[in-house]
């Protein structure tokens, strides 16, 4: 439960009800430790008060949106996997992201020259600047031109309907409607939970998805949080239609990964869509290659502290292999012959890549069950996933 709960603000904007709270979640921290951190008795708590401070939580229409102790995990996981899958991301778009933390993470990349952030609720953004300044703090980031990420010279922030913004500029037949608007290397959708009515049009109208595809450069990468992770007992979730639309418009490779440390009460799923299948080799870098890329691309800090608090090569490795749940949901979507064939082959210690690789852009069965086959031995060498 929560102790010492204090409401910092409640505001009803034009688009949503916003609550900001301070509280201590007694599942992870104690009131006694917090109180001790305020003393000057030389205790560990008093010497490291930042580890015992109250959490900050923002709620939108009653749903927990972000928390101080979980936001770094969530935003680093959302941003950096996609950014590293592009060879040289210079121009990035953010759909939503009103707290400013997604912008903060993008600006950590040295290659970035411009970030366009579009959020419909300008009042919410201003509230976050006031009550959640840590989320958009770029003051310690080498290369940033302002204490607040919103004021960085590389950032352009629009308070508009992001869906319509993309449709007006990049929908089919509108590519030259705004000649000043160039392609994006990475597009990050940090908008509402996909179960929210606000984004239901994503599942019934492909116009926006087409605008995303048209707005990306040839090696472009799109990433979105798509809500609570699927479960073995759950039905076919509505995001299946989302994935199908992305494949139909031309995305050549799609991947789902889960993150369970974001401060929510269950794991959260993310969808990465690659415009070109050639980008798979970057998605599947090994840990050493990923660590080298992180060191090359991520800016340092003036304080000497790590710029990334959570994301590293081992985290990226965990994202590369989809959870078994996604394979099960994929196979339940319809009677897929390749699923039954693959499971039978695995049971018999044989493999036929051509049966499993159906050519679908999203195929967790293929990702999870490609085996390293040793031709000379005629047997399975390893169950470890290898991209062939």
Image (cartoon, rainbow, N blue to C red):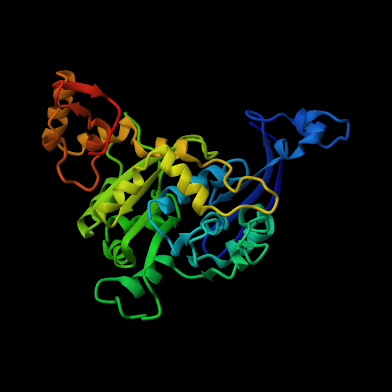
- Report the residue that reaches farthest toward the right: 41
Res 4 seen here = no
Left or right placement of residue 244 versus residue 1 in this view? left
The quarter of the rendered structure image containing the C terminus is top left
User: What is the residue that sits farthest to the front in this orientation?
Assistant: 376
Q: Please state which of residues 195 and 148 is positioned toward the viewer in this rendering.
A: 148
Task: Report x, y in % for residue 321.
Answer: 34, 35
Near-viewer residue (346 or 113): 113
**Image height of 234 relative to 226, above or below:** above
- Location of residue 261 in the rendering, given as x and y in whole percent from the top left corner: 51, 36
Viewer-nearest residue: 45 or 307: 307
Tell me where residue 98 sits by quadrant: bottom right
Residue at 48 percent of width and 60 percent of height: 96
Q: Residue at x 45, y 56 (%)?
A: 191
Residue 8 in the image: x percent, y percent?
71, 51
- Image quadrant where one finds the N terminus: top right
């Amino acid at each position: 439960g929560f102790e010492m709960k204090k409401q910092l603000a409640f505001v009803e904007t034009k688009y949503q009800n916003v609550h900001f709270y301070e509280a201590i979640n007694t599942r992870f921290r104690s009131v006694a430790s917090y109180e001790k951190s305020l003393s000057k008795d030389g205790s560990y708590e008093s010497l490291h008060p930042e580890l015992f401070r109250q959490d900050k939580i923002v709620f939108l229409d009653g749903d927990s949106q972000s928390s101080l102790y979980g936001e770094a995990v969530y935003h680093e996981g959302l941003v950096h996997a996609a950014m590293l899958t592009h060879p040289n991301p210079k121009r990035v778009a953010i759909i939503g992201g009103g707290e400013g933390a997604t912008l903060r993470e993008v600006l950590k990349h040295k290659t970035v020259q411009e970030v366009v952030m579009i959020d419909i609720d300008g009042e919410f953004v201003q509230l976050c600047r006031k009550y959640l300044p840590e989320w958009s703090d770029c003051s310690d980031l080498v290369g940033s031109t302002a204490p607040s990420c919103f004021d960085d010279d590389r950032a352009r922030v629009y308070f508009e309907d992001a869906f319509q913004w993309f449709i007006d500029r990049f929908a089919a037949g509108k590519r030259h409607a705004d000649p000043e608007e160039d392609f994006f290397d990475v597009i990050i959708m940090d908008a509402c939970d996909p179960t929210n009515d606000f984004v239901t049009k994503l599942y019934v109208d492909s116009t926006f998805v087409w605008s995303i595809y048209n707005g990306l450069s040839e090696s472009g990468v799109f990433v979105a949080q798509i809500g609570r992770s699927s479960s073995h007992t759950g039905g076919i979730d509505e995001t299946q239609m989302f994935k199908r639309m992305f494949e139909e418009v031309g995305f050549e490779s799609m991947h789902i990964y889960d993150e369970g440390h974001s401060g929510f009460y269950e794991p959260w799923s993310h969808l990465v869509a690659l415009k070109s299948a050639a980008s798979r080799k970057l998605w599947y870098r090994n840990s050493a290659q990923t660590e080298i890329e992180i060191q090359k691309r991520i800016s340092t800090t003036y304080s000497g502290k790590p710029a990334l608090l959570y994301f590293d090569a081992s985290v990226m490795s965990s994202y590369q292999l989809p959870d078994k749940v996604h394979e099960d949901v994929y196979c339940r979507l319809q009677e897929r012959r390749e699923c039954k064939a693959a499971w039978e082959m695995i049971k018999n210690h044989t493999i036929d890549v051509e049966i499993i690789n159906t050519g679908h852009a999203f195929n967790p069965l293929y990702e999870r069950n490609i085996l390293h086959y040793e031709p000379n031995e005629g047997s399975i060498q390893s169950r470890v996933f290898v991209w062939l």
